[in-house]
Image (cartoon, grey):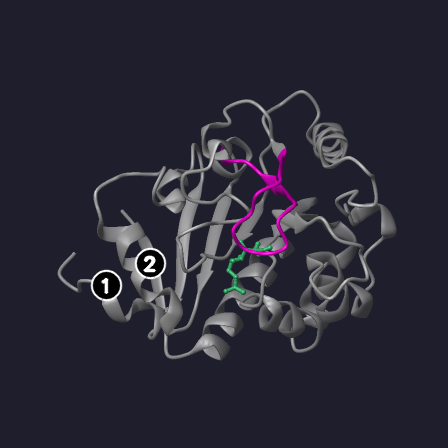
Amino acid sequence: MRDIRLFTDKASLSRAVAEAFVARASESERFSVALAGGGTPRLLYELLATECHDRVPWNRIHFFWSDERYVPLDHVESNTRMVRQALLDRVDVPAENIHVPPVELADPEEAAGRYEEDLRRFFGSGEPRLGWVLLGLGEDGHLASLFPGSPSLEESDRWVIAVKDSPKPPPVRLTMTLPIINHAAGIHFLVAGPGKAAALSSTLEAPQDPARLPAQGVRPINGTLTWWLDEQAASKLNPSK
Ligand code: 6PG
């Protein structure tokens, strides 16, 4: 059964996700979360750093990124820069708990391998069961840096790969793959605004075709998938489905 939660606007959506995050982080001795990039989750991160600040066990959380653009960490397009500004530079998370993708390396392939090694060190020999994976949805239906028609959607072994032909600039990125995403305990899509309505209705209601609609490839193996939507993004959904 699909878990869709509908909100009036991005502000109320973000506040609800923040409360769910606080509750989930508070019940874990060690809580790992892969953060989404882009613009949608910024307000969530700011709420966690401000209104929720005193209710979050910051020292028990490990932060990863579900994808990162291959630009310097101080670049305006950097997801790490956005997350640091909105959240991590404002809260007291131990430095060793912040797992920044190594985009300073010259070779993105090497960086993808290093990031995967960091994840494998964190999870040990078992499956990579992230506590939460936060994801956005692109207007073309992409998630993280997994784009329609990309061979990266077929990746079945590696947890992190380099993407060099992203249709969404910048072109070079590191991204978590469907295997690690689908092993997460909780997968959370945050989708807001009218620009996402077509991609969202196709993703949720069109026949299965993950090559064309990558988010249809998000199928939790032993976890939950929650869609946090505002009314504008949900405006094309068929209420009878
Ligand atoms: C990225 C993001 C990307 C994003 C979607 C939605 O690094 O670009 O990870 O997958 O989540 O493109 O972006 P917006 O939230 O800005 O609409």
Residue 18 lies, in percent from the top left, at 56, 67
User: Dot 2, how many residues are within 10 Å of its Cα: few (below 14), some (14-19), or many (20+)?
Assistant: many
Report the side of 21 relative to 8 (left or right): right
Q: Which residue does the image show at 26% across and 39% down from the upper left?
A: 208
Ligand 1 shows up in which quadrant of the image? bottom right
Q: Where does the magenta region start and end? A: 161-178
Secondary element at tag 1:
loop
Most foreground residue, 198 or 136? 198
Residue at the left extreme of this rendering: 240
Which residue is tagged 2? 200
CB-based contact (under 8 Å), mark 1 and mark 2: yes
On the image, numbered disc 1 is attached to which residue?
237
- Nearer to us in this view, 149 or 9: 149
Quadrant of res 140:
bottom left
Q: Secondary structure at mark 2?
A: helix
**Relative to residue 203, is residue 117 depicted above or below?**
above
Q: Is residue 8 left or right of residue 180?
A: left
Quadrant of the frame with the C terminus? bottom left
Q: Position of residue 12 (x, y in %)?
A: 46, 77
Q: Can you give x and y, in whole percent of width and height, for residue 107 in the image?
A: 78, 35
Pointer 1 residue Cβ closer than 8 Å to ligand 1? no
Q: Up-down: is 160 above or below 148? A: above
